Image (cartoon, rainbow, N blue to C red):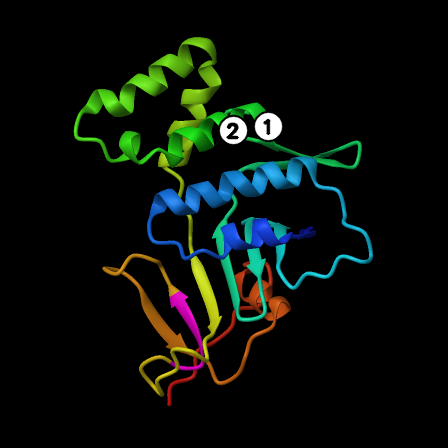
Amino acid sequence: MSKAYEFILDRHQARFFFTPIRKKQDAVRILLESIKIMLIYEPPGKSVQSEEKLFLKVSKMSRLVFESSEKIFTINFPFKVIIDNERLKFLTANDIELDNLLTSEALAFISRDDTMHGEDIFDFASPILDSSADNRDFWLLIRELFFYEDGYLRVDHDEANQDKDYHPLNHFDFFYSSNATFKIGLDEKYTIDRVIDILDITTPCHYLKLN
C-alpha cells in the first residue's frame, strides 16, 4: 500500500528547492536536503501560510514531489522508508541509516565544485579517503548516490516564457540538461494529485493523445 507524507516548506527552504536544476549534482543535493528536513520536521503553527510543499510518496517506486503555485517537480527517492515512534527513518541499499551527520557529510562533499569538477583525481578521492577512514558508511552512501537515477520531471505553468506551441503555458519538462531536455504541452494546469497519479505505477496508466 502506498503512503504519502506532506511537509510545508519555509521561505528559505522553498528558495533552495525551487532553484533550477541544471545537473546531477543539483538533484543529489535536493535529495539530501529533503532527507534532513524530513528527519527533524515539526509541523508549523496554523498562522504559517505557505504555497510551497514537499511530498514523499512511498510506493513500489517512491518519489519526492515539490509543489509551488507555478511549478511541480519530482525526483526518484531511492531509500527505504521506516516509521519508528511516528518518525521517519531512511535506510540505504546496504541498510545504513541516514542520520543528520552522515547526510551533512555527503552534502558537503557533493556541494564542493572543486571536488566534483577538479582536474586532479586526488581532488575527488582525498575527501572520500579521509571521511571513509573514520566512517565506512560515507563511501557506501557516496557510491550509491553516484549510481542513483534521479528520474527528474517538471510540470510548469509558465506565463513569463509562454510562446504558443514552442513553450506552452502548461507543459511537462523531461530531464534537465540542455542536451536531453524536451517539452510536452498540456491543455490545462495539472494538480499535484494528478501528477502523483501519473507517477504512480500501481495506478492505471495515462495516455497522450495526438492532435
Element at label 2: helix
Mark 1 and mark 2 in contact? Answer it, CB < 8 Å: yes
Callout 2 amino acid: Ser
Callout 1 amino acid: Asn
- What residue is shown at x 42% (from left), y 78% (from top)? 160
Q: Which residues are magenta?
A: 168-173
Residue 155, percent from left and from top:
48, 68
Circle 2 sits on which residue?
A: 104
* 156 in the magenta segment: no
Q: In the rendered view, tell whether residue 193 sits above or below residue 116.
A: below
Residue 183 is marked as none
Q: In the rendered view, tell whether residue 103 sits above or below residue 126.
A: below
> Mark 1 Cα within 10 Å, few/some/many (few <14, many 20+)?
some
Is 151 on the left-hand or right-hand side of 205?
left
Q: Nearer the viewer, residue 172 or 1?
A: 172
Mark yes or no: residue 154 visible: yes
Is 45 on the left-hand or right-hand side of 63?
right
Farthest residue, direction right: 46
- What residue is shown at x 62% (from left), y 60% (from top)? 52
Residue 4, percent from left and from top:
68, 53
